[in-house]
Each structure stands twice: as structure tokens, then as C-alpha cells.
Image (cartoon, grey):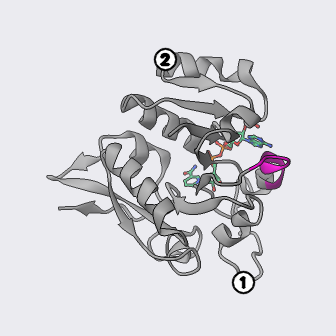
Amino acid sequence: MRIGIIGAGNIGAAIAELLANNSIEATIANSRGVESLQPLVQKLGGKITAGTIEQAAAADIIFLAVNWSKIPAATAGLDFNGKIVIDTNNPIESPAFVPFDLKGQTSSEVVAGFVKGAELVKAFNHLPPHLLTSKPDANEGKRVLFFAGDNSSAKSVVNKLIDRLGFTGIDLGSLAEGGRLTQFPGGALTAQHFIRL
Ligand SMILES: NC(=O)c1ccc[n+]([C@@H]2O[C@H](COP(=O)([O-])OP(=O)(O)OC[C@H]3O[C@@H](n4cnc5c(N)ncnc54)[C@H](OP(=O)(O)O)[C@@H]3O)[C@@H](O)[C@H]2O)c1
């Protein structure tokens, strides 16, 4: 399956590094264009290609890793039908760090509204970037990545990817229930660093 990454900041670049370290190809995009991504893709070797947002969104699995307020612009005009979108986002951003008002929805339920037709899986959002790129086997166990979503086959694909990247996945259930647990701020499991023995 082809992988795209929209967003190349702390989290997008960490995911690109993680994929490259596991010899998995991906196309990464940001708002400033392919030229601005050259230092990153050169550092990561040949597996990660800089592309346009449209090229990243043409993949089968798309990591969305942009600032919360930029999600509408980053997804506008793209066709997400039949895709798996991995929502790494949290509804807060620097420098204010004031949570956005989600009107009672979980953040992934809000994101799902911007990627209509996609199966959304919330994952890769509850750890800081350095814990995504450091060795996932620790203390004789494996680092846990939580995921949540409403479609079991999409979750199975994401779980297999998590496994291939060397982590162990834990399914927290639906976007409404599981998504809330890892959502930052407020989720009981957010920023928690677990090792499964
Ligand atoms: N940092 C963390 O510790 C952490 C942990 C877990 C989850 N998260 C979540 O992950 C998401 C990304 O956070 P981050 O720390 O990686 O942010 P960041 O370092 O500020 O990077 C944001 C990225 O989004 C891109 N972007 C902005 N507008 C875009 C657009 N219209 N189209 C395409 N790309 C666009 C930016 O590209 P340009 O620079 O070219 O504009 C940049 O590459 C956020 O939702 C955050 O809440 C962050």
C-alpha cells in the first residue's frame, strides 16, 4: 500500500523517519512545496519522496499531521474516497496552547468531517515525536501505540503497520470512545508512555 504524509513538521518528519528506518516508501508534503522538503528527504535517504499535497493524498494510507487550524486548508479539494487517513492531530496549537472548542465532538470526529469518504483511524498522536523515532523495543517489551476508529478493516491495516514499525498496537475502540482517551488535552492516555511486556 502506498503511504502519504501531509505535514512535515515535528510529527510528519518523525513519521517519515520512522518509515524510512523500516525501509517503507512514502511521499511527504507540506504547504511550502517540494523544494522546501529537500533537506528532510535527503537526510532520510531514498525511501521518502517530497511531493505535492495531491501526490501525498493519492496514497492508500495518508498520515495527516498539520496544525489544528490548518486542517481545513490542508485537506481542501482532495479526494479521500476509499482511503485510510491516520489522524495524528490534536486540537491545540502553539503559541497560545488554548484548546479549540469542539462543541462536544472528539477531535477525530471533527477531522473526519474534512476527509469525507475516508476511513479515519486516530493514531500516532499520543506520544512526542522523539518517542516515535527512538527504538520501540525497550525494557524487554515494545512501546505501545494506541489507535481508535470506527472501521475494523482500516484499524487492522493500521495495526499491521504499527507492528511492522516495531511497536505494539492497542485498539481502544471507536473514534467517539477510544479517540477521546488519547486526545490532547484531556485524554487519560495522552502523553502516557507504555511498554507492553
Ligand atoms: N509536536 C508534538 O509533540 C505532537 C504530538 C502529537 C500530536 N501532535 C499533533 O500533530 C499535528 C502536527 O504537529 P507538529 O508538531 O508536527 O506541527 P508543526 O511542527 O508545526 O508542523 C506542521 C506541519 O503542517 C504543515 N502544514 C500547515 N498547513 C498546511 C497546509 N495547508 N497544507 C499542507 N501542510 C500544511 C506545515 O507545513 P509548512 O511548514 O510548509 O507550512 C508543517 O510541515 C498537530 O495537530 C499536533 O497537535 C503534535
- Disc 1 versus disc 2: distance between alpha carbons? 43 Å
Residue 166 vertical placement versus 107 (above, below): above
Q: x, y percentage for residue 91?
A: 68, 64
Does residue 98 appear in this view?
Answer: no
Please report whichever mark, 1 or 2, sits nearer to the chain's N-terminal start.
2
Q: Position of residue 152 (x, y in %)?
A: 47, 68
Q: Say which quadrant the C terminus sits in.
A: bottom left
In this view, 80 is above or below 91: above
Query: Would residue 78 be visible to someone looking at this image?
Result: yes
Query: Which image quadrant is residue 23 in?
Result: top left
Residue at the extreme bottom: 104
Q: Is residue 121 above or below residue 167?
A: below
The secondary element bearing badge 2 is classed as loop
The type of residue carrying mark 1 is Gly
Q: Which residues are magenta?
A: 72-79
Ligand 1 occupies quarter: top right
Pointer 1 residue? 104
- Does the magenta portion include 32? no
Looking at numbered disc 2 in the image, what kind of residue is underneath it? Gly
Q: Which residue is mark 2?
A: 46
Counting other residues with Cα less than 10 Å from the Cα at mark 2, is it few (<14), some (14-19), or many (20 or more)? few
Kindly state the secondary structure of the residue where label 1 is placed.
loop
> On the rendered structure, is 39 left or right of 21?
right
Give the mark toward the camera: 1 or 2: 2
Q: Does the segment drawn in magenta span residue 76?
A: yes
